[in-house]
Image: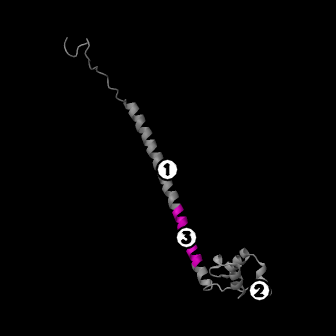
Amino acid sequence: MPLGGRAGGTVAKKTASKKPTKKELGERIARLEADVERLTTEAVTAVRKAEKKARKAIEQNTSLRARVDELEQAAPGSPIPQSAPAGEDLESLTAAELRSRAKAAGVPGYSRMPKAALVEALGS
C-alpha cells in the first residue's frame, strides 16, 4: 500500500477553517469598543476621585499647619509647674492622681517618679 493510504496509515484530513464572519467580527469589535469606553470612564472617575482626595488632604494639612503656627505664637514658651493649692493634702491622693496632676503641671519625668517624689514635685 502506498504511504498515506487508508489501510493503517494516517491521512491528514482537510478541515474547513472556521473563519469568523463579517457580522461576528463586527459584533466583537462593538463589544471591545464598549469595554474600552467603560474602562476609560472608570479610569477617569478613579483619577478624579484621587485628585479630589489629594486636594482635600492638602487643604487639611495646610489648615492644620496654620493652626499649629497660630497656637505656637499664642502659647507661652513652656508650661510652668504649678504647686498644689494651699491646704490640700497631696499625701492623701493616689499615685495615679498625682501623676495626672504632674502631667497637667508639666513636671518632667512624672511617669517614672514614685509617689513621694510626685508629692515633693507638686508641693514645691
Q: Which amino acid, mark 3? A: Asn
Label 1 – label 2 distance at C-alpha? 65 Å
Residue projecting furthest to the left = 2
Magenta run includes residue 38: no
Q: In the image, which disc is placed on residue 61?
A: 3
- Asked where in the image residue 86 lies, by quadrant, the reply is bottom right
Question: At numbered mark 3, what does the secondary structure look like: helix, strand or loop?
Answer: helix
Q: What number of labels is visible?
A: 3
Q: Which amino acid, mark 1? A: Glu
Q: Is residue 17 above or below residue 114?
A: above
Label 2 – label 3 distance at C-alpha? 40 Å
- Asked where in the image residue 19 lies, by quadrant, the reply is top left
Residue 20 is situated, as x and y percent measured from the top left of the image, at 37, 30
Question: At numbered mark 1, what does the secondary structure look like: helix, strand or loop?
Answer: helix
Q: Is 7 on the left or on the right of 113, as rendered?
A: left
Q: Is residue 14 above or below residue 46?
A: above
Which residue carries the number 1 mark? 42
**Disc number lying in front (3 or 1):** 3
Q: Residues within 10 Å of mark 2 (few under 14, many from 20)?
A: few
Question: At numbered mark 2, what does the secondary structure look like: helix, strand or loop?
Answer: loop
Q: Earlier in the sequence, mark 3 or mark 1?
A: 1
Q: How is the image coloured?
A: one colour
Q: Is 52 on the left or on the right of 20, as rendered?
A: right
Residue 14 is situated, as x and y percent measured from the top left of the image, at 28, 21
Which residue occupies the foreground of this view, 84 or 70? 84
Magenta residue span = 53-68
Residue at 72% in and 86% down: 123
Which residue carries the number 2 mark? 85
Which residue occupies the foreground of this view, 122 or 82? 122
Residue 32 is situated, as x and y percent measured from the top left of the image, at 42, 40
Residue 117 is situated, as x and y percent measured from the top left of the image, at 68, 82
